Image (spheres, rainbow, N blue to C red):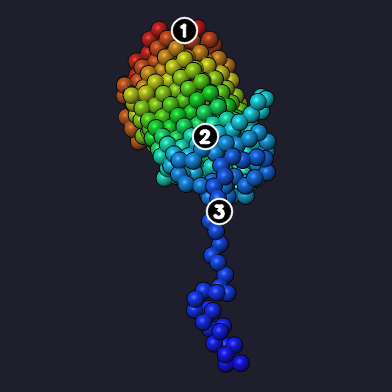
Amino acid sequence: MKKLWLVLAVSMAIGLGVSAAPAATKCEPVLTPGENLARVAASCPPSTTFTIKDGTYKLSTAVDASSGDTFKGVYSDGSRPQIHANGAQMAFNVGDTKGVTISGLSISGTGGGAWCEPACGGAIKKDGRNLHVLNVRLHHNLNQGIGNPGPGFVLENSEIDHNGSASFAKGGTSSAAGVKITRGPATFRNNKVHHNYWHGIWCDEYAGSIEISGNAVHHNGKSGIRYEICRGPSKITNNRVFANGHLKKDKGSRDGIVLVGAHGVGVANNVLRGNRGDGIQAKTADRQRTSGVSIHHNSLGNDTLKGCKLAGVVCRANGK
């Protein structure tokens, strides 16, 4: 018996009979429907290109992006691969990253409530530098399509619709929007932003160097474009902004384009029609003095233009 115990002891000492450590999960960045996108992303190093084939993917937790990652949907019909957050607080977490690209996807179904507001309920959330979002549809998320991306943000050729809810539109904590940004520079180019519960595009908190051009912004519950205490040089040009302000229970800020304590922005060559508030309105704000605002060559139809008599605002050549 002693000999047997001696053999066992020696075996353990030299590693025999000891379970091997589990092997690291292999990075396999080409995904087919039904695979766990969050798990695959976690198994891959930074700067991985994830090829997401057409179909439906359901999340149980957010996909945590790493710097340099690309998430690319591949499809041949008119419907992008569907990423359903399944009630997760966000679908893609891009916080503390640099150079992430998300393209060719449809992202919906994020959840949340009073316990996590306003940091939840968005398809793409948190502060990532040089985030590029291209050819996506972000829809039916409880708070935002995109919330508070960092400097260098670009949104192009995308559709942002049916985001936001009453839960995320309360008083001083309101955050619901198609897209809300609080840092710049940022570029919005050739997008469709519509039927969001609260504001369509919302710039806030001293964000600077914003370009909003060539977009169709319509049927949002409050303002189509809200430029609030943001700083230039910025431009809001060549957009079609119509039929905003359809949220009947709250009559404030139902304008097509509203400039609140704006600084250094040119608003030009936009077409405004059928907004329930003013077509364009410039307003003062306690947090920042209005200055360097130029509103010119906009087509208003029957919409109204207000705020041209404010110090720091110049209006010219606006008409039907």
Q: Quadrant of the N terminus?
A: bottom right
Q: Is residue 182 left or right of residue 6?
A: left
Q: Are marks 3 and 1 in contact (CB under 8 Å)?
A: no
Residue 319 is labelled as 1
Asked whether residue 114 is in view, the answer is: no
Name the one closer to the observer, 67 or 171. 67
Q: Is residue 258 left or right of residue 262?
A: right
Q: Is residue 102 left or right of residue 283?
A: right
Q: Label 3: how many residues lie within 10 Å, few (<14), some (14-19) or many (20+)? A: few
Instruction: Find disc 3 in the rendering and name its residue.
Output: 25
Q: Which quadrant would residue 228 be assigned to in this image?
A: top left
Q: Label 2: how many residues lie within 10 Å, few (<14), some (14-19) or many (20+)? A: many
Height in image: 179 above or below 19?
above
Instruction: Find disc 2 in the rendering and name its residue.
Output: 102
**Mark 1 or mark 2, which is nearer to you?**
2
- Residue type, mark 1 in image: Gly
Q: Are marks 1 and 2 in contact (CB under 8 Å)?
A: no
The mark tally for this picture is: 3
Mark 3 and mark 2: Cα distance apart in space: 24 Å
N-terminal of the pair, mark 3 or mark 2, is 3
**Mark 3 or mark 2, which is nearer to you?**
3
Q: Residue at x 49, y 44 (%)?
A: 65
Name the one closer to the observer, 201 or 263. 201
Q: Position of residue 269 (x, y in %)?
A: 45, 12
Height in image: 304 above or below 12?
above
- Residue type, mark 2 in image: Ile
Q: Position of residue 55 (x, y in %)?
A: 68, 36
Q: Considering the numbered disc 2 on the image, is that residue within a helix, a strand or a loop?
A: strand
Q: Label 1: how many residues lie within 10 Å, few (<14), some (14-19) or many (20+)? A: some
Height in image: 29 above or below 260?
below
Name the one closer to the observer, 294 or 12. 12
